[in-house]
Amino acid sequence: TTTERKRILLANIYGVDIDAQAVEVTKLSLLLKVLEGETEQSLKPQLSMFKERALPNLGSNIKCGNSLIGPEFFTGQQLNLIDTEEQLRINVFDWEKSFPQIFSGKNPGFDIIIGNPPYIRIQAMKEWAPIEVEYYKKRYASASKGNYDIYVVFVERALSFLAKGGLLGYILPHKFFNAQYGETIRQMLARGKHLQEIVHFGDQQVFKGATTYTCLLFLSKESNEKLMFEKVNELDQWRQEKTVSLQGDSTIQSINLKGVISQPSEAEWNFMVGEGSELFERLRKIPVKLSDVADRIFQGLVTGADPVFILKDIGRGRYFSEAAQKEYELDPALMHP
């Protein structure tokens, strides 16, 4: 019934987004779900019986705020250096005060957290959110190494909000499996044995109009000795068959490779199931690695701002700057391909 849907919605579903428009769209979507399949004739008896309005107020459930920054942000800050407009943009959010019923009692926290966190490199954020970038470095372990992507901070934050026995499901880039900036979050997940399942999409493109290399990451608050790993080689067929399962088995299919494997260490994550997995496991167990006998191979020259430092050679010692939209005369001896 509509009454039962409203009860489930108000008692169980909570959400936060920094975009006020996204919050309103979410509220509308949930309210439409409450009324799904109902007509004026079917609603009248239910509403008259309980003397209640058709649609609930979701103001206490779906809220606008910064999921990553709480009121402690202002502790020690010189507020006169942060104007009102900047404070409104940062939009700190107090989870415990906003959802007291969730963060009180014997088992505080959420039972299930799902989401699609933003994928934003910290270099881009420095341009329009330098204050937040510095805060993340101090507040979150996952933001302490290198030029991280903000989604790893969302993983750390969400994990801290899970109740005992809670589960987390995110869709996010799998780059942190191997990237240097992912070392801290890998360490966190590996030491806590939080990994429950990974659905790896490889180079299959999940989002239309955006080139992202993603996976489904399922975590549990409690420790697991084993995790389910699934490699998707054909996205459309996987969607139709819906083969992903949190229970899973170790079978190998023609479309997807599935298997139960041990929890990884905090080193780079290289998962292997199906053919070749036994060989990969034997190689992994060899105590001496290439890094033990050879110097580390570093990344080559990185400008940090290609449009500024990479110029177009237009001849006779003149170069065009994309960033400045101007020509410059430079000593050719200083310029390199």
Image (tube, rainbow, N blue to C red):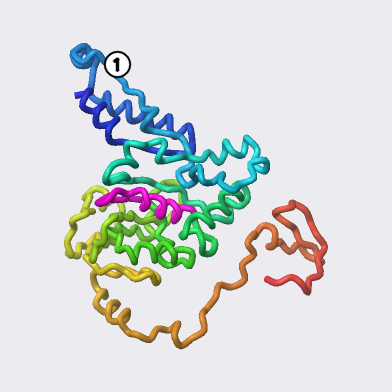
Compared across the picture, whether 332 is left or right of 301 comes to right
Residue 73 % position (x, y):
54, 46
279 within the magenta span: no
Residues drawn in magenta: 150-171
Q: Nearer the viewer, residue 308 or 42?
A: 42
Q: Residue furthest bottom?
A: 293
Residue 164 % position (x, y):
27, 51
Q: Which residue is mark 1?
A: 53
The quadrant in which the C terminus is found is bottom right
Compared across the picture, whether 329 is left or right of 124 comes to right
Q: Residue at x 39, y 33 (%)?
A: 62
Query: Where, by quadrant of the figure, is residue 305 drawn?
Result: bottom right
The quadrant in which the N terminus is found is top left
Q: Residue at x 60, y 52 (%)?
A: 126
Q: Residue at x 31, y 21 (%)?
A: 55
Vertical relation: 9 (above or below) 161: above
Compared across the picture, whether 236 is left or right of 80 comes to left
Vertical relation: 206 (above or below) 281: above
Vertical relation: 71 (above or below) 305: above
Tell me, yes or no, if residue 233 can be seen here.
no
166 within the magenta span: yes
Q: Residue at x 24, y 28 (%)?
A: 7
Q: Nearer the viewer, residue 323 or 70?
A: 70
How many numbered marks are there? 1
Q: Nearer the viewer, residue 278 or 5?
A: 5
Tell me, yes or no, if residue 225 can be seen here.
yes
Q: Amino acid at mark 1?
A: Arg
Residue 146 % position (x, y):
54, 64
